Image: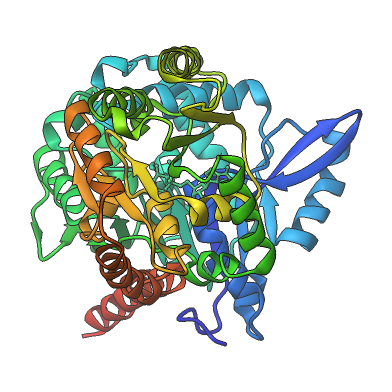
Amino acid sequence: MESNLGMKRLLVVSNRLPVTIDKKQGEYIFKESVGGLVSGFSAYFNSLQNTAFTEKDSVWIGWPGLSVEMSDQPAIRERLSKEFGAFPVFLDEATMDKFYLGFCNKTIWPLFHYFFSLTKFEDDLWEQYVAVNKVFCDAVCQIARPDDVIWIHDYHLMLLPEMLRQRMPDVPIGFFLHIPFPDYEIFRLLPRRWGAAIMEGLLGADLIGFHTIDYTQHFLNSVARILGLAHALGRVRIGERTVRVDTFPMGIDFAKYHETAKQPRVIRESERLRRMLGDRKIILSVDRLDYTKGIANRLEAFALFLEQNPHWQEKVTLALVVVPSRVGVDQYQSMKRNIDETVGRINGRFGTLRWVPIVYQYRYLPLSPLVALYSASDVALITPLRDGMNLVAKEYVAAKADNQGVLILSEMAGAAKELDQAIMVNPNSIEEIAGSIKEALEMPEHEQQRRNQGMQVLLAKYDVIRWADLFIKQLLGMRESERKAAAK
Ligand code: GDG
């Protein structure tokens, strides 16, 4: 198989590598990283490793998750390169804490998800953001060659495209943002010099991609308002260069979820789960622990549903999976306590000797149990307050091998633009979510099948490989038309 890269090598750059290193009793342990970028993009990256072309030498560059002592670095570097096609950016944990738990997750993450009251505006966090982007720039330059293609991912590295452009003017550089790009009225809450630096940083790329048309428009609008640069048909002229800005809704590894759901051991696990939960209807909720995911409203809505529909009591269980995330940020710790208390309160209020209304797990599940849970669940309740895309919604639909099951989806998730057969809800309205739970549980089977079939066709066609191929094709196409225009 050959991808759109032709004979070129792809350098993927993201804050975290797809593999995280941990140290236990003096031994380094390698495990899969958590999160949408890694779980989605790994399928594409791994497909490159299986080609017969230069692209199989593609490299993923990022932080491996902990400080590695100087003396251990060569061995770790070699193992990451050989086993994972990865190149580590070594940074100590104190620096990463200020960067990742600082500007990334106390400034950009809340602001870009419209939580401006949680946003910190502190100069030293900004300076650390600039400094770490420079470290990434040095790391990329250590291994980049002039004929490589560079694809940078996400909000941690928005200054990197321009930094690399200065050092490698002719290398094709793409950037993709996995979270929403907010409206100009929100973006301009950042001090102007930070906002302008972020815009200029991103415009160092040849192609900038977003999940939805709205995010693309918001970005172009901010470029015009903050930098005074005009745009036409998604093209921005900056100096001698043209930058293309476009929409690429990210897909999932459809075959992985669809086929895993059909494996006999996953079917057995799914049947076991149903029996364990007393053959009741199962509503599923899976997210990283994050205030953007709307977990608190979802729990209140489930309680309201039980109160309004007493005949459903003892007949339905909410399977709540919360995956630990950003453990060092204060809001995340208080949110965890809040969820623990709310689950206890609802179980105490409605539970009986025979029935626990909410079965709660605070942990990361391996793939098979996760797919078994997708497959066993009658309803997926996915109600983020804001979400760039939301891959869990897509994975749930993909795992429905028999096409049974109902997706309830927040209209604030990027995925709502594509999964239009879901029951759409406003995640701020507890009444609306409660009503949607009733509608989902009572939806006739043929209606469930009709809706899932439609969505599965779309998910199978626009999977993550297609998504990445379209992005790379456009990135290389941009460079080609620029080259031709310059030659005229
Ligand atoms: C960001 C954006 C955007 C979760 N728990 C387990 C587990 N996961 C996997 C899911 C899914 C991924 O993590 C989560 O992806 P999401 O898209 O839902 O959310 P974020 O992590 O916030 O991702 C988001 C995404 O980037 C991609 O652009 O969609 O909007 O915020 O793949 O399956 N996987 C396993 N066990 C778990 O317990 N195995």
Residue 358's spot in the image, x, y percent?
48, 28
- Residue 142 visible in the shown view: no
475 versus 209 height, above or below = below
Q: At 43% from the left edge and 56% from the top edge, which residue is drawn?
A: 396
Residue 301 can be seen in this image:
yes
Q: Is residue 13 left or right of residue 68?
A: left
Please give the name of the residue rendered at 62% of the width and 45% of the height, measured from the top-left corner.
33
The quadrant of the rendering that contains the C terminus is bottom left
Would residue 106 appear left or right of 374 to someone viewing this image?
left
Determine the residue positioned at 24% across, 21% down.
116
Quadrant that contains the N terminus: bottom right
Picture coordinates of residue 200 (x, y %)?
28, 44
Q: Is residue 171 above or below residue 423?
A: below
Please tell me whether residue 226 is drawn above or below residue 229 in the rendered image.
Answer: above
Residue at the far right: name it. Answer: 26
Question: Is residue 204 placed above or below 365 in the rendered structure?
Answer: below
Image x and y of residue 320, in percent:
49, 34
Q: Nearer the viewer, residue 91 or 3?
A: 3
Q: Nearer the viewer, residue 152 or 367?
A: 367
Q: In the visual, does 79 lie left or right of 449?
A: right
Quadrant of residue 113 within the rendered picture: top left
Which of these two is toward me, 115 or 276? Answer: 276
Q: Nearer the viewer, residue 4 or 22?
A: 22
